[in-house]
Image (cartoon, grey):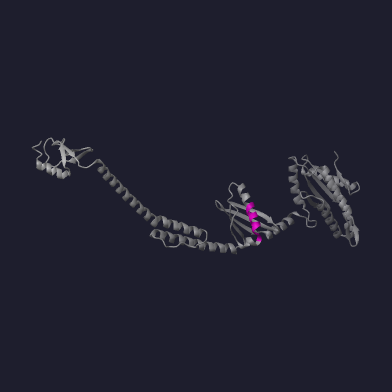
Amino acid sequence: MGKLLTSEKKKYLSNLLKIKNFQILKSSSSSKNLVFLKVGFDEIVLEKPQFLNDKTLKIKVSYPVKKILIKSIILSLIITQLSLFLIFSLVIIFLFEKYFFNPLQNLLKEIDQVKREKKSKLSSQYPTKEYKNLAIIINKALEDLSIREKIYTTIAEKTENLILLFDRNENILFKNVLATRYFNSEELKFLIKNFLEKIKKLKSPVNIINEIQIKNTWFSFRTIQVHENLYLLIGQDITKIKAKEEKLFNLATHDFLTNLYNRKYFEDVLERTVAASKRGKIFSLLFIDCDNLKIVNDTYGHLAGDEVLKTVARIIKENLRKEDIAARWGGDEFVIILTHCNKDCGIRIAQRILENLEKSEININSNKIKASVSIGLVEIDGTKEVNEILDLADKLAYEAKKDGKNKIKYIQK
């Protein structure tokens, strides 16, 4: 081994490995690596030089440096790497903030200002082409929205309808001039609150139509859910339409002379009343026949007879409740349905009519005429049909007239 590793080769190896002292420990001609053991350190494996081609070599390496120096070198390398990583990270963060985060923050801030109507559009002063293009696209959308808003506002102001836009929190987002003409702020809030209460009760409040009378004005309101939290209320003044409807209804259901309900309407109500009595509700029917009307017509003329009929109708209306229904049956006869009223209740109301007619006077050509009536009373208790009730009441009124007139007749139980 010594012959193979001459002094010249040792010197060459020493210069190559940068070490002063070493000892060959182990190697082989078949191995590509030459193993060096450092004194006090870990094993080092190096590629075997070409000239070391002997079968077995052993080298022992002794470094003139201490272990602490090696650790310092390693630590320096680690610190250098970390410093480079930190510098690189800071550069990345700086570039990210300058070209991405800060422009994004400015863009969001401008959008918020537009939302709060402090700005009408976004600026185009952004560091990157992408943000500039995004600002241009948003400004174009804002311009389109502004044009549409002007068009819709113009339509809303020119329409003959009342228009309100509100949310679930009762906030009014838009109201046209007509809305403020009909209602003040408090009335609008009250109106919206009522609609929201109705909406909550419905499972699918997409389209609601209501007719409401406010003060002396009738409105037809249509509420449309345009978004999950947004509602559009369109109102129309239908007072004139309602007046026409009421006029037509009165013409169809009322007697022209007395302004009481006519016979046809009364028959419809009586059918429903008898049906309700069979479900346990109590009613009474008064059949009223005017006394001596033929004598008045023959003596003073038919106009005087008409005045008697109108006076009787007025006294009847003045002595009934809101839930009662009175009608002119025909000629000199009247009929009344007394709601939730038994026989005793019916007697009291009939007696009141007789007493007030007794107090009234009709002036015909300086002649004072007193009107009187005969009344038949039948309790509607669910045991009789419509025709039976009418026939019995008519018969009782006839008996009252035969018995001296100005009386009430009913079946004693």
Considering only vertical position in the picture, is 144 above or below 203? below
- For the N terminus, the quadrant is top left
Q: Residue at x 73, y 45 (%)?
A: 272
- Whether residue 157 is visible to the viewer of this picture, yes or no, is yes
* Residue 187 in magenta stretch: yes
* Residue 30 in magenta stretch: no
- Whether residue 392 is visible to the viewer of this picture, yes or no, is no
Would residue 52 be found to the left or right of residue 243 on screen?
A: left
Query: Which residue is at the front of the view, 231 or 248?
Result: 231
Query: Which residue is at the front of the view, 332 or 167?
Result: 167
Considering only vertical position in the picture, is 346 above or below 141? above
Would residue 140 be found to the left or right of residue 152 on screen?
A: left
**Magenta stretch: helix, strand or loop mostly:** helix
Residue at the left extreme, as displayed = 3
Question: Which stretch appears magenta?
Answer: 182-194
- For the C terminus, the quadrant is top right
Q: Residue 192: x percent and y percent? A: 62, 54
Q: How many marks?
A: 0
Q: Residue at x 61, y 49 (%)?
A: 199
Query: Which residue is at the front of the view, 177 or 57?
Result: 57
Q: Quadrant of residue 306?
A: bottom right
Q: Residue 148: x percent and y percent? A: 52, 62
Would residue 233 be found to the left or right of residue 82 on screen?
A: right
Q: Residue 12: x percent and y percent? A: 12, 44
Would residue 116 be found to the left or right of residue 86 on screen?
A: right
Query: Which residue is at the front of the view, 216 or 145?
Result: 145
Q: Residue 215: x percent and y percent? A: 70, 57
Q: Quadrant of residue 74?
A: top left
